[in-house]
Amino acid sequence: MREILGRRRVTRWARRTAALTCATRWRWPVVPGAETRTPPWRPSRQLRQAVGAARGNGSGRRAAATMACSCPLPDCAVPGAHPLDPPLLAATTDARMVRWWWTNRPGAALLLATGGRAPCALSLPLEAGVGALETCDRMGLRTGPALATPTRVALLVRPYDLAELGELLYARDRVPSSLRFHGEGGYVPLPPTRLPAGPVRWLRPPEGDVPYLPRTEPLLDVLVDAGTAAPDGGDRLAH
């Protein structure tokens, strides 16, 4: 029983520990996001079976069908993976604030506020993102931290601004909509955040006190090629 309770304590405070590591060790500004919760209603057995059949009967997807976002929107596009209260602009590296946030809301998503002096990110659909990482390895291109959500892969890169990004994209004939850019005013969820469809996890964890972050330019051609081959998700949001 003591071991079980110990594991529960670790799980309960895992996001607070991760948030403090981001804020104090790596100096990445973080903010708590929304949470995923079991809705006050429970879908009927027939509805659960219908949803499971339509979605391939995946256990993660079945769980997602019975989870809701803690925000007021009943049809939230990215449940449990967006800023709520406080807003994104409140993101900080202050240890006291970070500890207070996740002590009071240990289940809150861990969000990295991208841009400024913080890392930016480039993300692709899951399969395309994994393929892009493998291509970078074959080409000898060094990548930095990379994480996977249930639907996407995000590569953290050095901060860039809109002018720099615009110049990089202008030189290319086509940039697929499946490739997304998370810069100033954006965010990405970090492990160990758990979304309705499954956990956010590190594919390549940050290393050392100052994690290496590559520049965007050397990686962009690989990511554009991988994104061009990926299905176009249009304007639908997903994490």
Image (cartoon, rainbow, N blue to C red):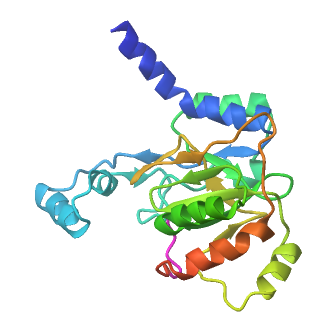
| Depth check, front residue: 176 or 47 | 176
**Residue 215 placement: quadrant:** bottom right
Residue at horizontal 78 percent and vertical 32 percent from the top:
24
Q: Is residue 60 magenta?
A: no
Q: In this view, does 30 lie above or below 168?
A: above
Q: Is residue 166 above or below residue 140?
A: below
**Residue 32 placement: quadrant:** top right
**Residue 83 placement: quadrant:** bottom right
Q: Where is residue 17 in the image (x, y as percent from the top left)?
A: 63, 29
Residue at horizontal 18 percent and vertical 66 percent from the top:
53
Residue 208 visible, this orientation: yes
171 left or right of 62 in image: right
Residue at horizontal 39 percent and vertical 54 percent from the top:
197
Residue at horizontal 77 percent and vertical 42 percent from the top:
211
| Depth check, front residue: 165 or 171 | 171
Q: Main secondary structure of the magenta part?
A: loop
Q: Does the magenta stretch include residue 236?
A: yes
| Depth check, front residue: 210 or 57 | 210
Q: Where is residue 22 in the image (x, y as percent from the top left)?
A: 72, 38
Spot the residue most to the top.
2
What is the number of callouts on the image? 0
Residue 178 visible, this orientation: no
Which quadrant would the N terminus be assigned to in this image? Answer: top left
| Depth check, front residue: 235 or 97 | 235
153 left or right of 69 in image: right
Q: Position of residue 221 (x, y in %)?
A: 70, 76
Q: Is residue 136 above or below residue 32?
A: below
Q: Position of residue 130 (x, y in %)?
A: 52, 61
Spot the residue most to the bottom.
173
The magenta region covers 234-239
